[in-house]
């Protein structure tokens, strides 16, 4: 998998080490090469990671999009290490429900999990099940 680590295009990245407890993250929808609500995503990240350089993160996203396809429509996963400022961006699988689900509904399950701060996206694999 290709990603951008600290503004450097990198092949064969190991994404699992970037999806570990305590890492900050954002999932950013990209449509036709344009990241949606990019400033809002980066501002939320900056609320907890005050030292995060949003211009560097924007540049990493541009590098990634240009390296794959300037017209791509997919999600980007951005992971940020608040301890040392390291960051990575890579494309991740996207799923959007079919129209049928909106018309007919779907069966759901509930998880009884509470985030310490629901306004912050901090990776915690306990939320995954």
Image: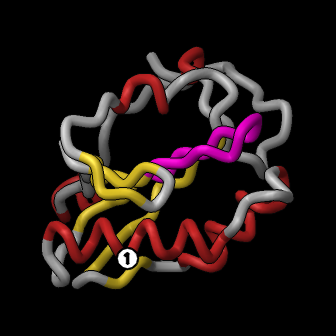
Left/right placement of residue 119 relative to residue 59 reads right
Left/right placement of residue 80 relative to residue 8 reads right
Q: Where 123 falls versus 51 (above or below)?
A: above
Q: Is residue 77 visible?
A: no
* Residue 97 painted magenta: no
Left/right placement of residue 2 relative to residue 110 reads left
Please provide the residue range marked out in magenta.
78-88
Percent of width and height locating residue 56: 58, 69
Q: Is residue 106 visible?
A: yes
Binning the other alpha carbons within 10 Å of mark 1 as few (below 14), some (14 to 19) or many (20 upward) gives some
The residue that appears at 37% across and 76% down in the rendered structure is 62
Percent of width and height locating residue 74: 25, 64
| Quadrant where the C terminus is found in the figure | top left
Left/right placement of residue 31 relative to residue 46 reads left
Which picture quadrant has residue 70? bottom left
Q: Which residue is mark 1?
A: 62
Q: Nearer the viewer, residue 103 or 51?
A: 51
Q: Nearer the viewer, residue 85 or 115?
A: 85
The residue that appears at 38% across and 57% down in the rendered structure is 8
Q: Nearer the viewer, residue 76 or 52?
A: 52
Percent of width and height locating residue 89: 41, 54
The residue that appears at 18% across and 74% down in the rendered structure is 72
The residue that appears at 33% across and 60% down in the rendered structure is 75
* Residue 81 painted magenta: yes
Colouring rule applied to residues = secondary structure
Under circle 1, the secondary element is helix
């Amino acid at each position: 998998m290709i990603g951008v680590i600290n503004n450097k295009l990198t092949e064969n990245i190991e994404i699992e080490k970037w999806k570990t407890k305590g890492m900050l993250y954002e999932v950013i929808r990209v449509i036709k090469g344009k990241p949606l609500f990019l400033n809002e995503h980066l501002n939320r990240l900056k609320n907890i990671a005050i030292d995060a350089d949003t211009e560097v993160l924007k540049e990493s996203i541009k590098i990634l999009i240009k390296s794959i396809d300037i017209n791509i429509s997919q999600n980007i996963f951005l992971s940020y290490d608040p301890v040392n400022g390291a960051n990575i961006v890579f494309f991740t699988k996207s799923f959007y429900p079919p129209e049928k689900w909106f018309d007919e509904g779907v069966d759901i399950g509930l998880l009884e999990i509470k985030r310490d701060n629901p306004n912050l996206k901090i990776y915690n694999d306990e939320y995954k099940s």
